[in-house]
Image (tube, rainbow, N blue to C red):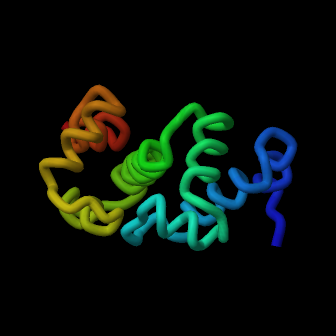
């Protein structure tokens, strides 16, 4: 089923990149590798990597990380789930790695982000 978001993406990106974006959303909470995504999309890893790099100016792992961190930010604000559970859900292998990546992306720790947006002291 084509969503409005997918229709808009179709106007900007190649069909392969649009499908990758959709598949990353579907599988965001599962371990993802370039080879697994290429297999899902029935293409080669090199073709997929080149298309993503061209259209998104990111590597595939970089795009997946970006989406996971964006989702983590949403979960931090919209839920009261502990950060450890959010990290495990997205699936970061270690809490420290999640916190470090989050800090690099948002220039603050996950707890500071939650406090700022949720009005906690």
Residue shown at 56% from the left, 47% from the top: 49
What is the x, y in percent for residue 55? 68, 37
What is the x, y in percent for residue 94? 15, 58
What is the x, y in percent for residue 14? 78, 47
Side of 71 where 91 appears, left or right:
left
Numbered marks: total: 0
Please tell me which residue lies in front, 109 or 119.
Answer: 109
Q: Quadrant of the C terminus?
A: top left
Side of 39 where 105 appears, left or right:
left
Residue shown at 23% from the left, 49% from the top: 98
Q: Is residue 22 above or below residue 77?
A: below
Q: Is residue 120 above or below residue 88?
A: above
Residue shown at 57% from the left, 51% from the top: 46
Q: Is residue 109 above or below residue 70?
A: above
Please tell me which residue lies in front, 24 or 117.
Answer: 24
What is the x, y in percent for residue 83? 22, 57
Please tell me which residue lies in front, 86 or 118.
Answer: 86
Q: Quadrant of the N terminus?
A: bottom right
């Amino acid at each position: 089923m084509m969503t409005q978001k997918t229709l808009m993406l179709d106007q900007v990106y190649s069909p392969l990149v649009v499908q990758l974006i959709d598949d990353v959303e579907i599988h965001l909470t599962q371990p993802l590798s370039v080879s697994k995504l290429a297999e899902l999309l029935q293409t080669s890893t090199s073709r997929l990597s080149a298309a993503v790099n061209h259209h998104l100016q990111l590597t595939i792992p970089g795009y997946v990380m970006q989406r996971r961190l964006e989702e983590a930010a949403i979960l931090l604000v919209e839920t009261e789930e502990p950060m450890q559970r959010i990290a495990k859900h997205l699936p970061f292998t270690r809490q420290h790695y999640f916190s470090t990546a989050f800090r690099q992306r948002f220039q603050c720790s996950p707890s500071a982000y939650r406090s700022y947006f949720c009005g906690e002291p």
